[in-house]
Image (cartoon, rainbow, N blue to C red):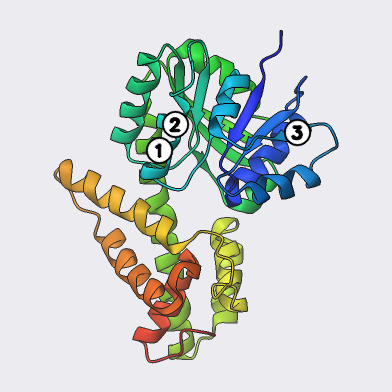
C-alpha cells in the first residue's frame, strides 16, 4: 500500500516543494498540508489540483493519519516545537523527513527523540531559491539510516529537485552541516556582488558594464542576484530570503567555525551588513539587501 504523505510548514520554499510533490510525486492519496496559520494551507490547497491535497488543522491530525511527514520550518526552535508536538501522538513506524535549515546538533537531537519514539528520521535540507523550489530544481541532501533514506529518494530527484546528495548511513547532522556551510557561499556571493556593484557605480564603471561580465563569467545565481540589485528588487515588501533566516544561518556557521578552531571572516562581514539591513527594513529585509547596506557605507542611498 502506498504511504500517506503530509507536509508541515508553508514558507517560500515549502509551498513550491508541496506543489511538486502533488504534481510529480505520483501520490495515490491526497497530500495532507498543515501550517500554523491555517489560511496559508487553505490558500495553497485551492491552488493545487482538485482532490490532490487536503488541509489539516493540527499537528496531531497530521501525524495520526500520515506515514511520511515532511517538515520545513524557519529555525531550530520551530522544528523542536513541531517534533515535540508530533511525538505526543503515537508515532511508531512513521518516517519524519526534516527539510529545515538548522544546526547539525539540532538535527542529531531530533533524530534521537524520533527514533526513541519508535519512528524514523531523515534530514533533507535543500539548496536553491524559492523559484527553484517552484520549478522542482532544488538539490536535496539526504542523511540518516540507509533504509530510511531510500524511502525518501523517490520524492527528491525528478519531483522536488533536480538532484540529491546521498549521505545515507551517515548521521543526520552531516546533511545540515553541509547545508550551513553551503549557505555561507550564498552569503559570500551576495556580499561580493554588493561590494562589486557599489564600486562599479562609485568608480564610474557603471553597474551595467559590470553586469555584462557577471552574465558572461558567472551565469546562474550570480547573475540572478546581480539582476535583483540592478533592478532594486533587493528592497522588497515580501523577502525571498528573509534577513532573520539569513542571520540565523550566519550564526550557526560562525558557531561551528569557532567550535572547530577556525573563523569565517567573510561571513562576519556579511552578517554585520545584514544587521544594518534589519535596522533599515525590519523583518521585511532580504539577504540581497546587503547591497543597500554596502551602498549606505559608500555614501549612497540604501534604495537604488
Q: Could you tell me which secondary element the residue under label 2 belongs to? A: helix
Q: Quadrant of residue 41?
A: top right
Residue 303 lies, in percent from the top left, at: 52, 84
- Crowd class of label 1 (few under 14; some 14 to 19; many from 20; radius 10 Å): few
Q: Could you tell me which secondary element the residue under label 1 belongs to? A: helix
Closer to the eye: label 3 or 1: 1
- Residue to which mark 1 is pinned: 81
- Tell which of 26 and 80 is nearer to you: 80
Residue 42 lies, in percent from the top left, at: 72, 46
- Crowd class of label 2 (few under 14; some 14 to 19; many from 20; radius 10 Å): some
Relative vertical location of residue 198 with respect to residue 90 in this rendering, above or below: below
* Gap between marks 1 and 2 measured at Cα: 6 Å
* Gap between marks 3 and 1 measured at Cα: 24 Å
- Residue to which mark 2 is pinned: 85
Residue 139 lies, in percent from the top left, at: 56, 38
- Labels 1 and 2 touching (C-beta < 8 A): yes
Residue 179 lies, in percent from the top left, at: 41, 41
Q: Could you tell me which secondary element the residue under label 3 belongs to? A: strand
> What residue do we see at 54% from left, 72% from top?
234
- Residue to which mark 3 is pinned: 53
Amino acid at each position: 500500500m502506498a504511504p500517506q504523505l503530509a507536509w508541515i510548514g508553508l514558507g517560500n520554499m515549502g509551498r513550491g516543494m508541496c506543489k511538486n510533490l502533488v504534481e510529480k510525486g505520483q501520490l495515490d492519496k491526497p497530500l495532507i498540508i498543515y501550517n500554523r496559520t491555517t489560511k496559508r494551507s487553505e490558500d495553497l490547497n485551492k491552488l493545487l489540483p482538485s482532490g490532490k491535497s487536503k488541509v489539516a488543522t493540527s499537528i496531531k491530525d497530521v501525524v495520526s493519519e500520515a506515514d511520511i511527514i515532511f517538515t520545513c520550518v524557519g529555525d531550530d526552535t520551530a522544528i523542536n516545537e513541531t517534533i515535540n508536538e508530533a511525538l505526543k501522538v503515537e508515532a511508531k513506524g512513521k518516517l519524519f523527513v526534516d527539510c529545515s535549515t538548522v544546526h547539525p546538533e539540532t538535527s542529531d537531537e531530533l533524530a534521537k527523540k524520533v527514533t526513541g519514539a519508535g519512528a524514523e528520521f531523515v534530514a533533507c535540507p535543500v539548496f536553491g531559491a524559492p523559484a527553484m523550489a517552484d520549478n522542482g530544481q532544488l538539490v536535496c541532501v539526504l542523511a540518516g539510516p540507509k533504509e530510511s533514506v531510500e524511502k525518501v529518494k523517490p520524492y527528491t530527484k525528478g519531483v522536488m529537485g533536480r538532484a540529491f546528495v546521498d549521505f545515507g548511513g551517515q548521521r543526520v547532522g552531516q546533511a545540515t552541516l553541509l547545508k550551513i556551510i553551503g549557505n555561507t557561499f550564498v552569503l559570500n556571493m551576495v556580499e561580493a556582488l554588493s561590494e562589486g556593484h557599489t564600486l562599479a557605480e562609485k568608480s564610474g564603471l557603471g553597474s551595467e558594464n559590470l553586469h555584462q561580465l557577471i552574465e558572461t563569467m558567472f551565469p546562474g545565481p550570480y547573475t540572478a542576484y546581480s539582476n535583483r540589485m540592478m533592478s532594486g528588487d533587493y528592497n522588497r515588501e515580501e523577502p525571498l530570503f528573509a534577513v532573520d533566516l539569513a542571520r540565523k544561518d550566519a550564526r550557526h556557521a560562525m558557531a561551528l567555525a569557532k567550535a572547530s578552531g577556525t573563523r569565517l571572516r567573510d561571513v562576519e562581514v556579511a552578517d554585520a551588513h545584514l544587521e544594518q539591513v534589519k535596522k533599515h527594513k525590519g523583518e521585511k529585509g532580504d539577504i540581497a539587501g546587503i547591497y543597500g547596506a554596502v551602498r549606505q557605507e559608500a555614501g549612497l542611498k540604501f534604495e537604488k
